[in-house]
Amino acid sequence: MKQPCVYMFANRRNGTIYTGVTSNPPRRAVEHREGLVKGFSAKYGCKLLVWYELHATMIDAITREKQIKGGSRADKLALIESVNPDWKDLYDTLI
């Protein structure tokens, strides 16, 4: 599946948040959930897909990722809670 996507993973509600971009959301979600890629998300246990946004092009997705990363933590929390107020794992909605 090739679909540009910006996403946020968290370790728990209001916990540590990781923001990223990918062209293959299901594959990337498995990598986060299983801790297959060493780095920030594995170190802090960010395994819950709490928000994602699909885009038409990778350039659009990267631009949006930079916008989100440049925003405040409060902005990220508001974005997550606007579509996922219970902080449920959205992994099943990808497949």
Image (cartoon, grey):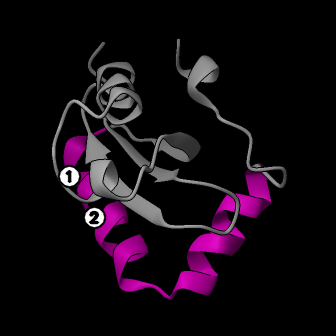
User: Callout 1: helix, strand or loop?
Assistant: helix
Query: Residue at the spot x=63%, y=55% of the render?
Result: 12
Query: Residue at the spot x=45%, y=85% of the render?
Result: 71
- Relative vertical location of residue 63 with respect to residue 78 in this rendering, above or below: above
The residue indicated by pointer 1 is 59
Query: Residue at the spot x=40%, y=41% of the render?
Result: 55
Q: Nearer the viewer, residue 41 or 4?
A: 41
The residue indicated by pointer 2 is 63
- Relative vertical location of residue 52 with respect to residue 79 in this rendering, above or below: above
Q: Residue 40 lies in magenta, yes or no?
A: no
Q: Amino acid at mark 2?
A: Thr
Does residue 40 appear to the left or right of 75 in the view shown? left
The x, y position of residue 84, in whole percent, is: 76, 49
**Residue reaching furthest left?**
38
Q: Are marks 2 and 1 in contact (CB under 8 Å)?
A: yes
Query: Residue at the spot x=70%, y=73% of the render?
Result: 78
The x, y position of residue 35, in whole percent, is: 29, 34
User: Callout 2: helix, strand or loop?
Assistant: helix
The x, y position of residue 76, in whole percent, is: 57, 73
The secondary structure that dominates the magenta segment is helix
Q: Amino acid at mark 1?
A: Ile
Mark 1 nearby-residue class (10 Å; few <14, some 14–19, many ≥20): few
The x, y position of residue 56, in whole percent, is: 35, 37
- Residue range highlighted in magenta: 57-83
